[in-house]
Image: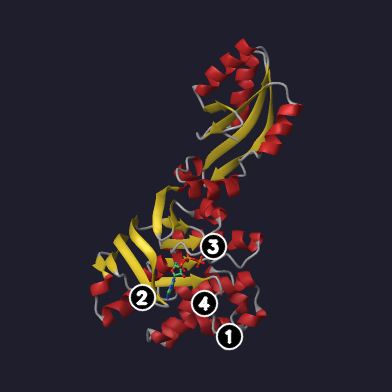
Amino acid sequence: MITFDRVNKVFGFEGREVHAVKDVSLTIHQGEIFGIVGFSGAGKSTLLRLVNQLERPTSGKVIVNGLEISSISQQELRKLRRRIGMIFQSFNLFNSRTVYGNVAYPLKLAKKSKKEVDDRVKELLRFVGLEDKAGQYPEQLSGGQKQRVGIARALATSPEILICDEATSALDPETTEEILHLLKKVNEEYNITILLITHEMNVVRRICDRMAVMEKGQVIEQGSVYEIFTNPKSKTAKNFVSSLLNDKLSPKLLERIRRDHSGRIYRVIFTRDNSSEPILSLVAQKYQIVFSILYGSIHEFQDRLFGNLIVEFRGSDVEVDRVVEELKTMVEVREVTEHES
Ligand SMILES: Nc1ncnc2c1ncn2[C@@H]1O[C@H](COP(=O)(O)OP(=O)(O)OP(=O)(O)O)[C@@H](O)[C@H]1O
């Protein structure tokens, strides 16, 4: 659906060159929600802007629906842009137009009849839950409502792709949840492929199927969200993941745990679709030892669980060794050392 094939983008800036996108190769499949994360300046926005030719690549190919877009005519480009909707962190609504007027705008540009415009605007306002706000102006709306208008407007011309540029970064956590839920509905009910950029791992965890991590213009890691969250390879991905999973033990915390707990301490990682508690309880019961969960979390990734727990086992060395051996057949277990914390 969208393919970046060894794409580079170099900007000339105050007499020097900025290599904003470096040799990026990436494929986003039809119907998926794909997230790109990275720190500020990593090149995410530039990569997005290459998809609808707001930027042209310095080298390499950007292919959208089989079309290599740097070689298409102006007319084809206009058509392509109608098939790509876009929403922004700052909503970019027309303040002088009503909610209705904002959503109707791209339809009028596409020269739809009055009835077609009216039917479509009403359908979309219903879809985003704003039927009763049609006559209001953006300044009368909350941030979440404004983004709903942004989404309705982006969907007006029935695009196949929706590009989201930090679409929830200006919203509070509860409103973010509502907008993510709406984006998921856009993806499922209209079968629209979504490409989003964000610096919030929670956004990716909640709705994306696959993801890429960018750093200094390059894609340094890509894969399923579950894969990257449960087994990040690069230092940057590890940092992003632990910011959300909160799974790092500071040396201070480890010291306190050691002081307060005399048993042997292990990190237990669940990456399968089984719940942590019964496994730990069953094995502990079998060998008659006691365990306590000292720290950690269990996260849900769409329909899969990931648990990362710090567990103390109390019993004789032989018993604990047996428990650990048995647990290792089901989950990942490793002794917590100063080094790994
Ligand atoms: N038009 C431009 N002219 C010159 N340099 C640019 C231009 N656009 C982007 N850059 C530079 O390219 C690099 C990547 O910027 P980009 O905006 O793509 O990163 P980003 O990951 O989206 O960051 P942010 O999250 O802060 O928007 C930065 O160093 C930026 O300063």
Task: Tell me which residue sits at (58%, 42%) in the image.
Answer: 299
How many tags in the picture? 4
The disc, 2 or 1, on the residue closer to the chain's N-terminal end is: 2
Amino acid type at image mark 3: Leu
Labels 2 and 4 touching (C-beta < 8 A): no
Question: Distance from label 4 to label 3 (Cα)?
Answer: 17 Å
Question: Distance from label 1 to label 4 (Cα)?
Answer: 20 Å
279 relative position to 226: left or right: right
Q: Which residue is situated farthest in the right direction here?
A: 260
Labels 2 and 1 touching (C-beta < 8 A): no
Which residue position is annotated with label 3? 182
Report if residue 113 is visible in the image: yes
Q: Describe the element under mark 4 as helix, strand or loop.
A: helix
Query: Which mark is nearer the camera, 1 or 4?
Result: 1
Amino acid type at image mark 1: Asn
Disc assigned to residue 81: 2
Amino acid type at image mark 4: Lys
Q: Describe the element under mark 2 as helix, strand or loop.
A: helix
